[in-house]
Image (cartoon, coloured by chain):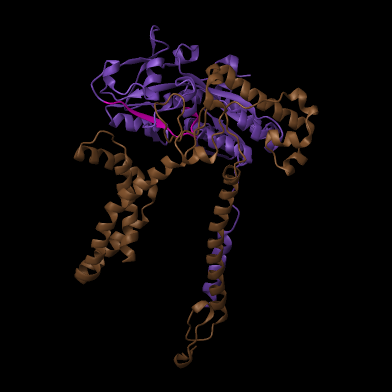
Chain colours: A brown, B purple
Amino acid sequence: MPHRTNLGRRTAGWMGVLRGHKARPGEWIVEKGIFLVSLSAILLVFLIITFVAREALPILLGQTNSAAIQDVIPAAEIDKLSPEEIRRYLGLTRKQMAEYDRETLVALFEVREEGIQGIVEKYPELMNDPDARLNTTKWRHLLLPHQWSGYRQPEYIWQPVGNIHKYNIVPLVVGSLKTTLVGLLFAVPLSVAAAIYVSQLARPTVREIVKPAIELLSGIPSVVVGLFALLVMATFLQDLLGYETRLNAFVAGIALGFAVIPIVFSIF
Amino acid sequence: MKPKSYLAALAALGLAILPEARADITVKGSDTLVILAQKWAEVYMQQQPGTRIQVTGGGSGIGFAALQNRTTDLANASRKIKAKEIENCIKAFGKRPTEYKVALDGLSVYVSAENPIKELSIPQLQGIFAGKTRNWKELGGPDAPIVVYSRENSSGTYEFFKEHVLKGGDFVASAQTMPGTAAVLQAVAKDKNGIGYGGAAYGAGAKHLLIKKDDSSDAIEPTEENVVSGKYPIWRFLYIYVNPALDKGEIAAYLKWIRSDDGQKIVKDVGYYPLPKQYRQ
């Protein structure tokens, strides 16, 4: 069926989509469908961030206590406490408190008691350790170095498993920045130079082959790139450059660079 | 587009949103147990064609988290459950999870095949992995720095090693974290100054050390006899935890089969050690 193109009377259509003709019903359904799908993708990303933030909220607001040795209230004294005190001791929300019957609360008290008794029996030297009673989820411990017992100097330590949980964001952030920096230093000059060459200087036949080949790199799953780095690149780079530790941020940065190259290349 | 292609597109969309086949039994948890769990599932599904079992790894910590969120029926674990996790399970389904011992494992300490050292004691291991001993020459080896390979902290193997060899202390900050015992072994095999630890099932390519309980004991090798009798100092049970409300019907039958002679025969094939009779209640 022939259709007219009203080139003279073009206006910005729905969501800036310019059409030369009135939307046919099938097209309208598909357009709205694509709009819904992309909206849901954005919404889902926000929902993921919301749920993760909800889990992290108790720590950010300072409502958790991760001390290895905390004061224990024996299960036998549960009747002497008010409901509010029980709720605060067990760290429950009001909704959870309303749901649990007395038996469950007694069981929770007993588990709490057994847990702390077990640790004290197994590691009696913990009683003398000043770090054992420290609430390590406070902001002060998340950001600043702390002199832990057994270490020679105040340090930023991330060891969330063990008797004394040591939480600090700084090693995580510095590690990510280190690898990213190495990756960018490796990838950006290479891919910008490649982009300039392919777009300005290459003959059309060369461009037809090189451009899709580099963009194909983005299709390699990052797990495969990681495995390749772990098995092949680590040994190759160590033999080439002769440093001591085989697995390090340099190898990781190069692997990250492989993932970044096609993205920077196709933007130019 | 023609009407026929509309219909084809709609039909494809309809098929895409059909519900997937659900497994009858979901098993999640320890990477140490994952190969064994897969083998158990395969053999059991061949013997009982009606059952579908789905096995995932991730680490003992992941298994316990899934148990609390009720996204798994069985949680594989290479360490005992902790008090905080029991607390969360009680909050989630009202009762403590039931623990079943399913196999024995000896944790081996691996070094490169080129390393001349053959045996170490537990205090020496503690010094190495905590970072107090930094050079192989302090232990009678070549003059080279010790490169420590460890596991991620969701791993039960990591926790077990920390508790029993490091006596609750921390690993050295420069320890390299690897995502699985196979990765630890592979890294140690390629690094002549490396040392790492892992379950006995994955031993190939590097050599394991003979371990002495303290500096004056005999050096014991991680063989089946030594692990089962308890002579080898770093041994552990492998566990499966289950919500007591779900422990009936198919799931109870599967757990019973695992602890029977049929199931324990498979344990040997994979490389772990079968449970002695007195633990199979």
- Magenta-drawn segment: B145-157
Task: Judge whether B141 appears above or below A157 on screen.
Answer: above
> Is residue B256 in sight in this rendering?
no
Quarter of the image holding residue B117?
Answer: top left
Q: Name the one closer to the observer, B76 or B142.
A: B142
Q: Residue at x 67, y 27 (%)?
A: A111
Image location of residue B237, percent across then percent down: 53, 22
Image location of residue A255, percent across then percent down: 32, 47
Q: How many marks?
A: 0
Quarter of the image holding residue B233?
Answer: top left
Left or right of B278, for residue B158: left
Q: Name the one closer to the observer, A149 or B264.
A: A149
Task: Judge whether A73 appears above or below B219 on screen.
Answer: below
Image location of residue A203, percent across then percent down: 19, 70
Residue A107 falls inside the magenta stretch: no
Question: Looking at the figure, which quarter contains the C terminus of chain A?
Answer: bottom left
Q: Residue at x 47, y 82 (%)?
A: A18
Task: Looking at this view, name the residue that lies furthest to the bottom.
Answer: A8
Image location of residue A2, percent across then percent down: 48, 90
> Is residue A8 in sight in this rendering?
yes
Left or right of A90, for residue A244: left
Q: Name the one closer to the observer, A263 or B107.
A: A263
Residue B150 falls inside the magenta stretch: yes
Task: Judge whether A115 appears above or below B64 on screen.
Answer: above
Q: Residue at x 35, y 27 (%)?
A: B204
